Amino acid sequence: MQRRQALLLAAGALAAPSLVHAQEAWPVRQVRIIIPFAAGGPQDVPARIIADRLSRRMGATFIVENRPGVGGGLGAQQVARAEPDGATLLFISSSIAILPTLQAQLNFDPLRDLAPLTVVCDVPAGLMVRADSRFADLSALLAAARAQPGILTYGSGGVGSANHLAAAQFGALANIDITHVPYRGVSQAVNAVYTGEIDFVFGSTVEVLAHYRQGRARLLGMTMPGRVPAVPEIPAIAEFVPGYAAPNWFAMFAPKGLPEALHGRLVAELLAMRHDEDLLNRLGSAAAIVRMDGPAALTAQLSAEIPRWREVIQRAGIRGDS
């Protein structure tokens, strides 16, 4: 019996270091999650929820920091150039797939320069007009655009932003001439719809769904390939413009070279949030769908979308410095 107890104690001593290692503090005391867009954008809410959860679990304080500029390029490049020590992460939209083509001067390739963590969620976007707009549906807007080429105006969060390219692709596939008016953030473009400065805007459901539900705006179509389950009454734009789709998503990255143990621990914590009720409820209320499906899925999505958006940019003649 004494020998058995001694063996059990020895086994416990051998197991203890791995348990301590699993629960040890993160190697830095403060971690910045960089959002490369202006404060108040749609990434802010999920990023702050995630920062709060990681702060509770990782033995460090995770803070969200907005670093706008160059269509998200400056903040993304800052993370790519950061030390891979666990102190800096990136939270960005699907615009990450646009940067290699539109901001070539940055010499930045997300597949080469960043370590993927996960797609956080899919975020549908909608074509929004004011509730009192003369466009009752998408057919009316398309008819007006064809009758008066170049007269209808749409806003975006800036040249080369995901919602700018969603609209550019819409115009190209619908064979209509519409005029782009860039703003510093989608919230400014949404306000411009209300003041009558522009006719419509493409905005993520995180940004525009509340306006629709409050009766202040109409959503004439959604950018996903099919109807969005949360708002099945709103048609997909593809029902009017065959072949149209502009999926939008949020994702997280770390600097390339993050040690495997740290990378694996971050991924594990993020994937566990698939079942986080607060995250599910907050994003679900905005028709977003939580994914948290890991690095391989993010790499595959990015690899597919970089060439797709390159074609849209080149066909539309969009320049990052315009």
Image (cartoon, helix red, strand yellow):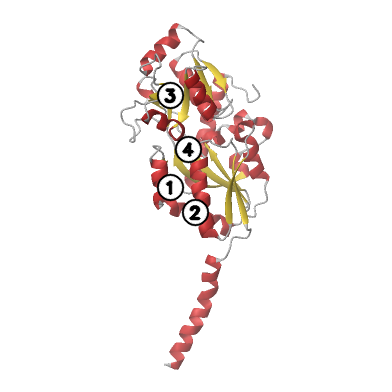
What distance separates the C-alpha of mark 2 from that of mark 3? 33 Å
Amino acid type assigned to the residue bearing label 3 in the image: Met
- Name, please, the residue furthest toward the left: 233
Q: Are marks 2 and 1 in contact (CB under 8 Å)?
A: yes
Q: Name the residue under label 1.
A: 279
Q: Identify the mark nearer the N-term, 2 or 3.
A: 2
Q: Identify the mark nearer the N-term, 2 or 1.
A: 2
Q: In which quarter of the image is residue 111?
A: top right
Residue pictured at 63% horizontal, 26% vertical: 320
Q: Where is residue 273 in the image (x, y as percent from the top left)?
A: 44, 52
Label at residue 249: 4
What distance separates the C-alpha of mark 4 from that of mark 1? 15 Å
What distance separates the C-alpha of mark 2 from that of mark 4? 20 Å
Judge by depth and name the residue closer to the eye, 88 or 185: 185
Q: Mark 3 points at which residue?
A: 128
What distance separates the C-alpha of mark 1 from that of mark 3? 25 Å
User: Vertical placement of 109 versus 322: above or below?
Assistant: below
Q: Where does the C terminus fall, quadrant-wise?
A: top right
